Image (spheres, rainbow, N blue to C red):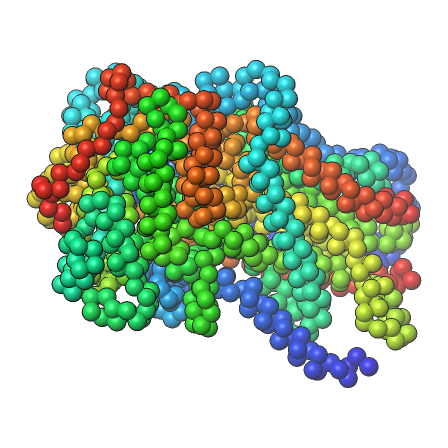
Amino acid sequence: MKTNRRSILFLTLVVLIVLVSSAGVSAQSVTINWATIAGFYTDWAEQVAAEYEAATGVDINIIGIDFPQLYQNQVLESVADTGAYDILTYDVGWKAEFSENGYLLALDDLVAGNENAQAVLADIHPALLETTSHWRGQTFGLPYYTFTMGNFYRCDLYEDAGEQAAFLSRYGYPLDFPRTYEQMADIAEFFRRAPGETLKGETLDQDFYGIGLMAGRFPQVQDEINSIAWSWGAQVINDDGTPGTLSMTFMSAMSLYVNDLLPYAPPGATSSAFDEVIAQLRQGLIAQTGPMYLDQFPNAIKTEDEVSGARVCTAPTPGGHTWVGAFGLGVSADSGHQSEAFDFVAWLASPEAQRRFAEGGGSSALQSILSDTALIEANPRTMGHYPTLLRVLDHAADSNFYPNYYFVPQGGKIYDEMTTYYSAAASGEQSIEEAMTNFAQAVERICNGPCEVANDAFGADYTPIPKPFPYVEYYGR
Amino acid sequence: MQSAKTSLGDVIRHLVMLVVLIIFLFPIYWMIATSFKAAPDILTRPPTWTFTPTLDNYRFAFEEANFGLYIGNTLLVAGVSTILVIIFGSLASYSFARYNPGDGHIMFFILTTRMMPGIAVIIPFFLIFREVGNTDIGKALLIGLDRPGALIIVYTVLNLPFAIWLMHSFFQDIPKELEHSARLDGYGRIQTFIRVVLPLAAPGIAVTAIFSLMFAWNEFLFAFILTRDMARTITVGVSGFISQQGILWGPLTAAAVVCVVPMLLFALALQRYMVRGLTFGAVRG
Amino acid sequence: MANLADVSSQVSTRAAESAPPKKRVLSDTWYSVLLITPAMIFIFIFALFPLGYAINVSLRYADLTSPQGISDYVGLENYRFALNDNIFWASVQRTLTFGVAAVAIEMVLGIAIAFLLNEIKWLKGLARSLFILPLAASPVAVGLIWRYMYHPEFGVYNGILASLGLPEQNWLGSTALAMPSVIIFDVWQWTPFVALIVLAGLQALPKEPFEAARLDKASTWRILRTLTFPMLAPVLTLVFVLRAIDAVRLYDAVFSLTQGGPGQATEVVTYYLYRLGLRFFRLDQSSAMSLLFLYAVVVFTALLMRRFMRNIAERARRA
């Protein structure tokens, strides 16, 4: 009996060892290891990869890594030259760091020999090309997914005659999506209702909030606050590389966020991330979001099914200048199959693959897809935000407005410290001044003095200056 | 005297126990309940208590992620490292309990190896296994980055101090007289250890095995840094549901349930060994 | 289940058929060294190498993301930096707050539950197994689930409070409540650990002294004070030390519950070291701080366990 059990255990172990080791012995063909974000349109990625495998005979191995760990995992493997990944996935803030430190391969030679890639590069929106592909005049990757920000709001509430009249008499201007952050604050205040008060003429049985904010210590609080600061002409990193968060303008942007927006958000805002804000919208708890990733549209639109009478619309963030970025795909400098890896990257970014990405709910980086009216009309629930998205991107490109922060080689680390200190100010753990002073010190520590701002591609005396958003031409949804 | 009061005291004790159990098990219940909820029932205000159960989350978890492989890897890594820990740990622990080599200093030194923050040693481990993985020995024994052998070694090292210390008091409690009589009866040292000492230390060994296995089963940081794909374990798989589309609560809870159930079964299976069925009083007396 | 009767009968039957006692090949000392060798080899190779690596790096300039990577020796510069780093010391303070509160509550609750488990009659085995559940759940996964349960709008705890008419709490989002919420989570997960080990210790206690005391009509309190606790002391010390060591190394719970937030309200030492080492890749500074941390824990444990170690040595000598 006992011997029996022991031998079963032993056999199981042997079988497991064989299974595991056989999994490691792969076929003769080339395998491309693609490190990417887990659960992130995995269906799409697997499907396109399978087709690519069938067409080319190159094996694609998708390695999903949860987003909070993606940065350190890729850096560690790159620093140690393990060659484990052929394709790296990077956030816009990491681009400079990955390129500067040689984790990513400069793609210019490979692009020169690849007509497909040249066509893709010509199609990528110029704003995204600047923020996610280019570094010191070279190309380091292709964006395939943009999370550029906009404003989601409950247009059924904004269009309600009773609410409109009340808003006009209280604030002296008509209720519509906000053109300035002060208006956003007014709307947030206006729609904050206690149980027993009415909304759209109906009595509420629970609290209703004027705005949903992602003010927790998650890497989103800075995207909201920087949007305000950038629209007002403040900088996280000044032209000379010193931290800009102690300027009067930056601190008043911070103060508007903490004192004029946050009080009208659900109390959970200080521990919320973006998915909780979308959940608040879908539960009918909030009237609008702050600056929010437009790629969340396919989730946000579900509010219309879940809250009776609700409609969700998108608009640019007030002033239109915001976090413009995308996830990019680049080829690892350690890869043993650089040209095969690049071919696959070019295929993922191509109109053919991107079209299917868009239909499945992804936000494409290609102008041809973003402006394909017929496609958008055919897919209103996955692509309904495209017109707004395109306007925000166009505005960045037209104004030639790219904040210095995008061009600092330590961008990924600074991003992490923003989360810490912006959240400290939002939660009241530190005063705004205290938090911004601490942040400035942290930045100086990371850069060892003033940071380098490598935006020479725009000319030696380039300064990003925000331009007013052309609202007259904008219709919104 | 005791029995006269039994009924009332017992009822109260059981009631208190029941309340304590409910408090401690509620989060587990909530996790299991959430894993059977459809997506719209998960983030609701107020929370949903009654719902139509669905298996969608489990289907999603197994289809999206390679959970079969992760479970196999975890079984292998946690199982082998626990066996190693118990073998090496019980030998060492017994030695310390009986003979105290190093006069306590070695034993204290062993404990200190557990005090280093994992963060500080993870990069050295990464570099060691990068090198070992490129050698023939590393390849043959599956030791290297993204190989199960690496995690087996790490978990054995991390669990050994704990195991040696935990089993120590159990070995010390075994009366020396029993071993003497076994030796007089013609047992060799090793035989005495295996046939007499080990069975008597069963509760301690069972507790140690449970905790070692649980630690290895649930460890996240080393598993995450030292594996990528092939040798990935289940906790890393669970964290894969923290996606850029938000945390996928349904599949995450389903995966977490799948992760916990084997541990529960293991604990139930070993639980009878945890009862010490004899007293030493007679011998000691 | 092996019991004494089985073992002794085995011993005597074996004795009848087996040869006279074998000769001693090894002295006790060599035998004891032989027994610890496998474990020591493991520990020497795989625990000392990373330690040596950390010491080496802590004396150099090492920013893994800089082009130089691990470069020149800088003497004690990193230690000087660590000692002057306010963020480090603030995080040390948070770790101490957490450790003292969590371990104290866990010890008291755990011991109480162990006594309760020891006394109950029905379904004892089942209750004991169910208590393993919080421990068996992966801290990262179950931490996320607690984050969900703590959520102010969608969480079940506020749901329960609201239905009882009590004010809802901003568990993880308010500076004041975040640390207590992390402590509650840790207490939930680790109290069963204390309870189960103390229970194993309780069950290992000899019965005779207690029966004798009861015959003498000693009060329950006196039995506890003069018999139970003194006899449990080694187990209690051990559990306390193991919990204390783990509590100051807290990482998983903070990682999945708060990421150190809001602000820095729950940024404990290990989380700060994690950011420094694995997000900023300042291996030099994080190694120096880790070594200071290690030194502090070793000294603290050594002081705490002096008596315990002496007892162990004495008992081994007596045996």
Q: Left or right: C300 with respect to A302?
A: right
**Residue C76 point in image, percent of width and height:** 64, 22
Residue B244, picture quadrant: top left
User: Residue, x 43% and y 39% (percent of image)?
Assistant: A433
In the rendered image, is residue A145 in sight?
no
Q: Residue at x 36, y 28 (%)?
A: A237
Choose top left, top right, bottom left or bottom right for residue A228.
Answer: top left
Relative vertical location of residue B245 with respect to residue A367 in this rendering, above or below = below
Residue nearest the observer in this picture, C257 or A405: A405
Rendered location of residue B209, percent (x, y): 65, 50
Above or below, comparing residue B79 to residue B140 in the picture:
below
Q: Residue furthest bottom?
A: B4
Residue at x 53% of width, y 22% of height: C62
In-image side of A58 versus A355 (left or right): right
Residue B96 placement, left or right of A288? right
Q: Residue A373: horizontal and vertical position, in percent? A: 9, 42
On screen, residue A39 above or below A398: below
Residue nearer the viewer, B269 or C285: C285
Q: Residue at x 19, y 33 (%)?
A: A467
x, y percent for residue A287: 25, 57
Counting the numbered discs, the total is 0
Task: Compare residues C152 and C115 and report the one nearer the observer.
Answer: C152
Q: Quadrant of the N terminus of chain A?
A: bottom right
User: Does residue A291 appear anywhere in the picture?
Assistant: yes
Pick whichever, A257 or A117, lies toward us.
Answer: A257
